[in-house]
């Protein structure tokens, strides 16, 4: 990972809820106590356990885990809604734990936006005023904040709803208002804690699509919390999988589905389709290897052509009805060959 591009970094972060947290931390480190043992012996909860990760600029980093895994507790350390028992959170190289109360408020107001599952919109204010609320707190003049709010209404697909009140909107529309409110201060970082989990599947997928499109155009660095692996695989540039307060594995969706670190992760991914998560570069043979085995690259220019980042789904479409392999080209140069056998093995998980 490029250190110059790192926006968020967690270094050995622990969070223990309960009395004598420092004593509990020493006991856990010395005796390698598990979460259940800590609860039984000390009546304390190890919510986050020695976590390290970094998030690059413009990345969507998904933290995925079941209820009680510590994912929501962890994300609240980033803007210091929760103070770690031990360890550091750095934002743009700045130690969050070293900030004064005034510095912290300024950072939250201008650099970090947060979107919760429960939007907590102000019920008696209009949608426009809800979006502009953060700007109002910064004493932005009414004309400017209303202009910015109207622009964000367009951005999130709610043009014409500025004068409505939240109760007049559907759940999905309220989520869009919450996202627009988080974007109003133009933060560098978005923290999203299961923002779509309470929505119906079709609305949820639509909002996922909209957020991915927004992310590409606005270049926000996002930490996205979810308990749904399908959502994590769809949304994340990389994914961190948590269990009992620990980060079990961090990797791209492709890395995790192809190389699960342990049986816990393997159980999660075994039911996932690989068709849109595994790419040509993972299953292709080098041209020299293919030529040595088959000795036939003379007509390669007539074969179906694809990029190394083409997914299995698109490769299947290319190879249907063909007797020849697929030529994988990068910047016009032959990078590899995908045969039907390699494609079938990739789909089966043997790549």
Image: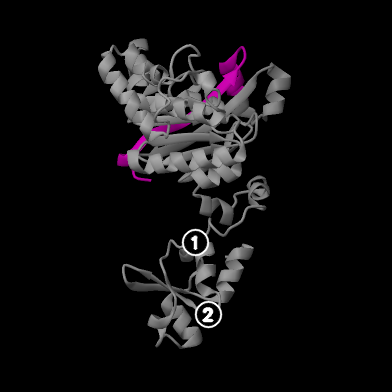
At x 61%, y 12%, the residue is 19
Q: Is residue 221 above or below residue 230?
A: above
Q: Which segment did they paint magenta?
A: 1-27
Structural crowding at the residue carrying mark 1, measured as other residues with C-alpha within 10 Å and reported as few (<14), some (14–19) or many (≥20): some
| Residue highlighted by disc 1 | 311
- 144 inside magenta stretch: no
Q: How far across and how far down the image is residue 117, in percent?
A: 55, 26
Compared across the picture, whether 268 is left or right of 285 comes to right
Q: Nearer the viewer, residue 265 or 18?
A: 265
- Label number found at residue 289: none
Vertical placement of residue 219 versus 272, above or below:
above
Residue shown at 69%/16% (left/top)? 43
Name the quadrant containing residue 30. Answer: top right
Q: Position of residue 106 (x, y in %)?
A: 32, 16
Q: Earlier in the sequence, mark 2 or mark 1?
A: 1
One can see residue 210 in this view = yes
Residue farthest right in this picture? 40
Rendered image coloring scheme: one colour
User: Marks 2 and 1, how far apart in space?
Assistant: 18 Å
Figure check: 244 above or below 315: above
- Camera-nearest residue between 192 and 132: 132
- Residue 196 point in image, percent of width and height: 55, 33
Secondary element type, mark 2 = loop
Q: Mark yes or no: residue 186 visible.
A: no
Instruction: Give the camera-side residue of 75 and 276.
Output: 276
**Secondary structure beneath label 1:** loop
The quadrant the C terminus occupies is bottom right
Residue 206, image x and y in percent? Answer: 51, 41
The reply to whether the magenta stretch includes residue 4 is yes
- 37 relative to 294 in the view: left or right: right
- Where does label 2 land, which residue? 322
């Amino acid at each position: 990972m490029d250190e110059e591009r790192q926006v968020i970094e967690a270094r050995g972060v622990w969070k223990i809820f309960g009395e004598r947290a420092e004593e509990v931390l020493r006991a856990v480190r010395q005796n390698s106590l598990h979460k259940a043992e800590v609860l039984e012996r000390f009546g304390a909860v190890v919510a986050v356990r020695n976590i390290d990760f970094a998030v690059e600029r413009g990345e969507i980093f998904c933290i995925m885990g079941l209820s009680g895994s510590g994912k929501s507790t962890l994300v609240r350390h980033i803007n210091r809604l929760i103070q770690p028992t031990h360890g550091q959170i750095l934002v743009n190289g700045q130690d969050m734990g070293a900030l004064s109360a005034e510095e912290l408020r300024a950072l939250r107001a201008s650099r970090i936006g947060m979107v919760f599952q429960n939007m907590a919109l102000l019920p008696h204010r209009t949608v426009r005023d809800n979006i502009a609320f953060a700007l109002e707190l910064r004493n932005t003049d009414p004309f400017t904040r209303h202009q910015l709010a109207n622009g964000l209404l367009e951005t999130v697909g709610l043009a014409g709803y500025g004068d409505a009140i939240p109760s007049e909107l559907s759940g999905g529309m309220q989520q869009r208002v919450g996202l627009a409110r988080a974007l109003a201060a133009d933060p560098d970082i978005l923290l999203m804690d299961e923002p779509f989990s309470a929505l119906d599947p079709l609305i949820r997928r639509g909002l996922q699509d909209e957020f991915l499109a927004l992310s590409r155009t606005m270049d926000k660095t996002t930490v996205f919390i979810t308990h749904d692996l399908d959502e994590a695989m769809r949304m994340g540039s990389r994914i961190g999988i948590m269990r009992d307060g620990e980060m079990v594995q961090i990797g791209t969706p492709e890395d995790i589905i192809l190389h699960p670190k342990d049986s816990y992760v393997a159980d999660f991914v075994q039911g996932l389709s690989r068709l849109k998560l595994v790419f040509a570069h993972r299953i292709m043979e080098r041209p020299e290897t293919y030529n040595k085995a088959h000795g036939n690259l003379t007509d390669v220019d007539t074969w179906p052509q694809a990029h190394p980042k083409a997914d299995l789904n698109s490769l299947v479409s290319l190879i249907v009805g063909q007797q020849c392999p697929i030529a994988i080209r990068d910047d016009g140069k032959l990078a590899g060959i995908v045969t039907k056998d390699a494609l079938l093995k990739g789909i089966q998980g043997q790549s």
